[in-house]
Amino acid sequence: MDGAETIARAFVEARRAATPVADYPGARPTTLADAYAVQDRAIALRGGAVAGWKVGRVPAPYLEQLGVPRLAGPIFSDQIRTAADAAAALPVIAGGFAAVEAEYLLRIGSTPAPGTTLTAEQAVDLVDAVHVGFEIASSPYAGINADGPLVTISDFGNHNALRVGAPVPDWRSRAFEDWQVSTHVDGACVGGAQARTMLDGPFGAVAFLVESLARRGLTLLPGQWISSGAVTGVHPVAVGAQVEARFGELRVSGTIEAAARQESMSETKHGEWTG
């Protein structure tokens, strides 16, 4: 197996087993192309429908090296918890990395034309709904963020679950970008900010994805969710924590739980993932 295959298989197996890995399972990627090659292979090995994409911010020390302000990772359909899940259980990999992020979730309404380059303002037309919610960032590898964005990309962008909350009214006015957002863990406020402070905002995340996915031969599809980036920061959590995010008058909440073990690659037919 080549390096990308080895790393991808190690992360997919560890996530299925819900067990941590002590060390990065191979040579760390050194370019965006290398990192996304691992992610693409892991998507294929895992299987399941890609129902959206998470977007994260590239830390300032890496901007010159990478030349892009954001990174992306897949959201699978079985990782989404909806507003109907009143007491949503939000899984993390115990012993690995675990954090909660308050985010605006944008639902794609139309596919961009091939070769499209968009501004944040133009990206609004691709969206048909905006909701409040959480991204649960979790990886078997506890050092995933400390090791930098290329390592983060290589393990599904450090994504593990999405909690879709209430819809944002009158979202096309973009007034919600000025709402005060706060994140609370076990009743304590751990961060507050406004979406207006996030690079070029939530719709800028959509514009970024259009170009980023096109370079990988992919595109946004109607119905997919875009987790547009942590508004208040990336907040570490432990199993059992009660989490809540407040977006103006809207609220979304859940409970952090340990992810359950699933079938391993050797236990699925022909070694292919069933998702």
Image (spheres, rainbow, N blue to C red):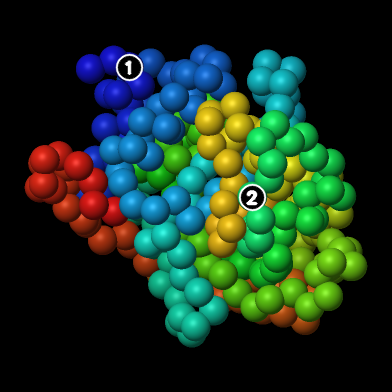
Where residue 275 appears, as percent x and y from the top left, is 29, 53
- Residue carrying label 2: 111
Q: Residue at x 33, y 38 (%)?
A: 44
The answer to whether the residue labelled 2 contacts the one labelled 1, judged by CB atoms less than 8 Å apart, is no
Q: Nearer the viewer, residue 150 or 82?
A: 82
Where residue 35 appears, as percent x and y from the top left, is 48, 24
Quarter occupied by the N terminus: top left
Image: 72 above or below 179: above
Q: Nearer the viewer, residue 192 or 50?
A: 50
Instruction: Say few, some or many: other residues with alpha carbon within 10 Å of mark 1 (under 14 / 14 to 19 / 20 or more).
Output: some
- Which three-letter amino acid code belongs to the residue tagged 1? Gly
Indicate left or right for 240 with 175 as reference.
left
Q: Nearer the viewer, residue 25 or 132?
A: 132
- Which three-letter amino acid code belongs to the residue tagged 2? Thr
Q: Earlier in the sequence, mark 2 or mark 1?
A: 1
Tag 2's secondary structure? loop
Q: Nearer the viewer, mark 2 or mark 1?
A: 2
Please tell me how many numbered marks the rendered image carries.
Answer: 2
Residue 3: numbered disc:
1
Q: Residue at x 83, y 75 (%)?
A: 170
Residue 195: numbered disc:
none
Indicate left or right for 237 with 222 as reference.
left
